[in-house]
C-alpha cells in the first residue's frame, strides 16, 4: 500500500521488480544475472528478472513490494508471500516465506513504447514503466517469436496504434529481429523492438524521447536503430529518482555555485 500509482517516479530506484539473489545461490539454480526467474511458494508463483549481487545474504532472496499488478504481467510479489499475521500488531509475515527458484529460458526480448497502458498478449512476460504521458514495456518471450502474418498481428496488438497510422519496419527473420514504429502525422505514436539476444536492444534512454517526436524522412533509419536521440543515452543514471537528478547536474551545480 505504498500508493505507487500516485508517485510513479518512486519506482525508478530499481529498473523493474528485480529478484535479488546471491551469486552462489544463483549458480546452483542455473540463474544468470538479468535472466527471467520462476519463484514459487506455498502461496503461489511469480516471474521476476534476477539481479545477482554479493550484497544479498546467501540462502535468502529479496524482491521489492511496491510493484503492483498494473505494472507486471505476473502480478505483485504479495501473491507469493505468507499471509500469516502477527496476532497483536497484524503485521504480515513478509520476510519468512520459504521459496523455490528456477531459471526460465527467454525465447526473445523486446522494448515497447506506446501512449496507452493496459495488458499485453500472453505470449510474453512484461513489466510496465510509467513515463510522462507514455509507457515503456520490457518484454521477455515465453514462447518462440511468431513468424509471418502472425508476427505482424502480434506486433500490431503490442503497438495498439490507430488504424490510419503509418507503419515503418525493419525485419530480419534469420536473426530473430523486428523493429517497428507507428507514425501519426509524421510523429512517433508507438515503437516496438524485438530481438533474440537482449544485448542487441538499444539503450532505453535513447528510445524514450522518440515517442511523440517528429521524424524527418532522412532520420527514419536512425529511429529504428534507436539512434535518433543519441545524446539521451549519455545522461547517465539518476541519483534522485523523484526529481530526476543526474550526476552531471550535481557536478554542474557544484562548479557553478562553488558548493
Image (cartoon, rainbow, N blue to C red):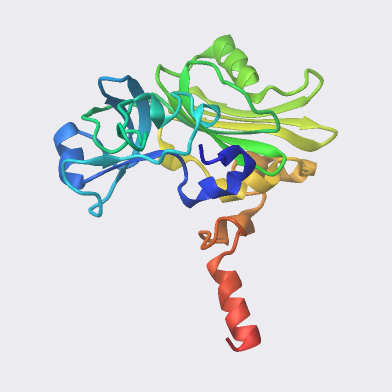
Residue 79 relative to residue 236: left or right:
left
Q: Which residue is farthest bottom?
A: 258
Residue 6 visible within the image: yes
Q: Residue at x 20, y 46 (%)?
A: 23
Query: The C terminus lies in which quarter of the figure?
Result: bottom right
Q: Quadrant of residue 18?
A: top left
Q: Residue at x 59, y 10 (%)?
A: 149
Give the percent coordinates (x, y) of residue 254: 58, 82
Q: Quadrant of residue 212?
A: top right
Q: Which residue is farthest front?
A: 88
Give the percent coordinates (x, y) of residue 151: 55, 16
Q: Which residue is farthest right?
A: 185
Give the percent coordinates (x, y) of residue 195: 47, 31
Q: Residue at x 45, y 25 (%)?
A: 75
Residue 203 visible within the image: no
Q: Is residue 64 above or below residue 85?
A: below
Residue 75 relative to residue 90: left or right:
right
Residue 210 relative to residue 130: left or right:
right
Callout count = 0
Q: Nearer the viewer, residue 246 or 76?
A: 76
Residue 79 relative to residue 162: left or right:
left
Give the percent coordinates (x, y) of residue 12: 52, 49
Q: Nearer the viewer, residue 158 or 5?
A: 5
Q: Nearer the viewer, residue 249 or 56?
A: 56
Amino acid at each position: 500500500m505504498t500508493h505507487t500509482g500516485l508517485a510513479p517516479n518512486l519506482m525508478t530506484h530499481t529498473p523493474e521488480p528485480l529478484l535479488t539473489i546471491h551469486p552462489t545461490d544463483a549458480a546452483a539454480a542455473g540463474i544468470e544475472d538479468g535472466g527471467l526467474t520462476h519463484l514459487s511458494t506455498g502461496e503461489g508463483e511469480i516471474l521476476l528478472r534476477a539481479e545477482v549481487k554479493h550484497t544479498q545474504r546467501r540462502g535468502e532472496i529479496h524482491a521489492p513490494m511496491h510493484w503492483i499488478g498494473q505494472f507486471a504481467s505476473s502480478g505483485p510479489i504479495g501473491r507469493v508471500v505468507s499471509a500469516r499475521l502477527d496476532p497483536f500488531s497484524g503485521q504480515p509475515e513478509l520476510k519468512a516465506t520459504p521459496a523455490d527458484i528456477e531459471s526460465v529460458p527467454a525465447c526473445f526480448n523486446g522494448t515497447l513504447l506506446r501512449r496507452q497502458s493496459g495488458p499485453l498478449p500472453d505470449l510474453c512476460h512484461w513489466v510496465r514503466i510509467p513515463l510522462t504521458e507514455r509507457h515503456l514495456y520490457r518484454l521477455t518471450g515465453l514462447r518462440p517469436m511468431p513468424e509471418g502474418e502472425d508476427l505482424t498481428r502480434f506486433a500490431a496488438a503490442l503497438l495498439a496504434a490507430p488504424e490510419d497510422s503509418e507503419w515503418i519496419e525493419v525485419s530480419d527473420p534469420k536473426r530473430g529481429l523486428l523493429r517497428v514504429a507507428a507514425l501519426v502525422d509524421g510523429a512517433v505514436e508507438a515503437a516496438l523492438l524485438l530481438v533474440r539476444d537482449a544485448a542487441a536492444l538499444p539503450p532505453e534512454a535513447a528510445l524514450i524521447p522518440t515517442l511523440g517526436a517528429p521524424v524527418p524522412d532522412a532520420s527514419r533509419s536512425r529511429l529504428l536503430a534507436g539512434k535518433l536521440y543519441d545524446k539521451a543515452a549519455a545522461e547517465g543514471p539518476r541519483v534522485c529518482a523523484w526529481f530526476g537528478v543526474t550526476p552531471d547536474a550535481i557536478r554542474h551545480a557544484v562548479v557553478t555555485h562553488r558548493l
